[in-house]
């Protein structure tokens, strides 16, 4: 157990966002799965299902109003071993391509925007098209498929001719893999898993738009990273720093004038450095500071 916990901690300490996403999904799946077993055995299976509904995205807007957080929580919640297994495998395979060529933050951005777009399209389709109206009540969306498909399509949009080796098929270009999943999702969008297939299409749209905007100079992952950084900063105590300015009195007016100018400039420089360090703490947390920056804060706090 200690070894497993150490592996989890290592995934977060190394800053590997792809591994972090997988760890979060697996931990949520295991915890809720085990809890569900105990509730069911104890005769409270219906109660656990009611609790689970507060993590899944409802198709009914009147219910969504009271649980808006489900637009995020739903794509971290899975039911069934194969459900999470295939999602995490695809997340790992295609997430590695994104991470290697355009960075870890882009993996996070694609995953989150894919989940949001997938959930939004699912809500729109179910509430705007009469065909889905009878199924609105009691229909819920769960699973990371929207975010995963966003990463697949994002990778294909960024490098359409990149080749991967598939079992039984051999080398296949990313654009064909992405096209296959988009087409199959569209064909199955009126089947038993209509909500999930529609979410796939929303995620695919997010992946395409994300990379298209990235090529135009607009990085959608920034807003996601900044929001998460802000949330983290709420749970990290910031050091209390008091910076004061002291000047040395001189015996003559002439010497006072000549000594004040450089001393004032030095103080201004010091203050600007402290402000920059405090801004860095606000954006990325105290642990993001270098050893030198921490020393400067320590020295400033003693004045």
Image: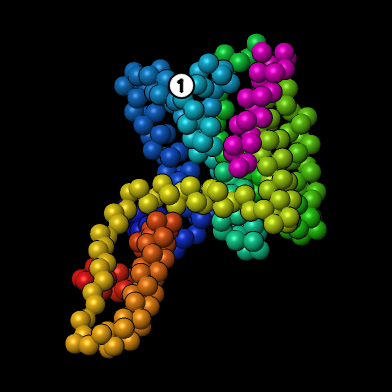
Residue 71 coordinates in the image, percent (x, y): 53, 32
> Is residue 290 among what the camera can see?
no
Q: Is residue 81 above or below residue 299?
A: above
Question: Which segment is the magenta one?
Answer: 113-133
Give the main secondary structure of the magenta stretch. helix
Residue 12 coordinates in the image, percent (x, y): 42, 57
Q: Quadrant of residue 291?
A: bottom left
For this view, does 134 lie left or right of residue 279? Answer: right
Q: Which residue is mark 1?
A: 66
Query: Residue 182 or 38: which is nearer the viewer?
Result: 182
Residue 265 coordinates in the image, percent (x, y): 38, 78
Residue 125 part of the magenta segment: yes
Residue at position x 33%, y 86% from top?
258
Residue at position x 38%, y 38% from top?
31
For this view, does 75 lie left or right of residue 101? Answer: left
Residue at position x 26%, y 63% from top?
241
């Amino acid at each position: 157990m200690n070894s497993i916990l150490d592996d989890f901690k290592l995934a977060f300490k190394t800053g590997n966002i792809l591994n972090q996403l997988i760890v979060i999904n697996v931990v949520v799946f295991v915890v809720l799965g085990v809890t569900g077993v105990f509730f069911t055995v104890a005769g409270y299976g219906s109660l656990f299902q009611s609790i689970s509904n507060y993590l899944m995205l409802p198709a009914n807007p009147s219910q969504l109003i009271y649980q808006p957080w489900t637009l995020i929580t739903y794509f971290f919640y899975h039911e069934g071993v194969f459900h999470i297994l295939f999602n995490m495998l695809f997340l790992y395979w295609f997430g590695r391509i994104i991470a290697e060529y355009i960075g870890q933050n882009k993996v996070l951005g694609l995953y989150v925007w894919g989940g949001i777009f997938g959930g939004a399209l699912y809500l729109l389709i179910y509430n705007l098209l009469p065909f889905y109206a009878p199924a609105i009540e009691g229909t819920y969306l769960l699973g990371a498929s929207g975010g995963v498909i966003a990463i697949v399509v994002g990778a294909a949009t960024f490098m359409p001719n990149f080749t991967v080796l598939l079992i039984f098929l051999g080398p296949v270009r990313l654009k064909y893999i992405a096209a296959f999943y988009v087409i199959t999702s569209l064909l199955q969008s009126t089947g038993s898993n209509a909500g999930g297939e529609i979410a796939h299409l929303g995620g695919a749209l997010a992946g395409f738009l994300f990379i298209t905007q990235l090529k135009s100079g607009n990085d959608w992952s920034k807003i996601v990273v900044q929001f998460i950084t802000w949330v983290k900063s709420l749970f990290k105590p910031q050091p209390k720093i008091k910076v004061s300015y002291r000047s040395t009195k001189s015996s003559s007016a002439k010497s006072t004038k000549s000594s004040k100018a450089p001393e004032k400039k030095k103080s201004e420089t010091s203050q600007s450095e402290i402000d920059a360090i405090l801004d860095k703490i606000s954006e990325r947390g105290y642990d993001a500071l270098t050893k030198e920056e921490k020393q400067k804060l320590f020295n400033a706090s003693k004045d």
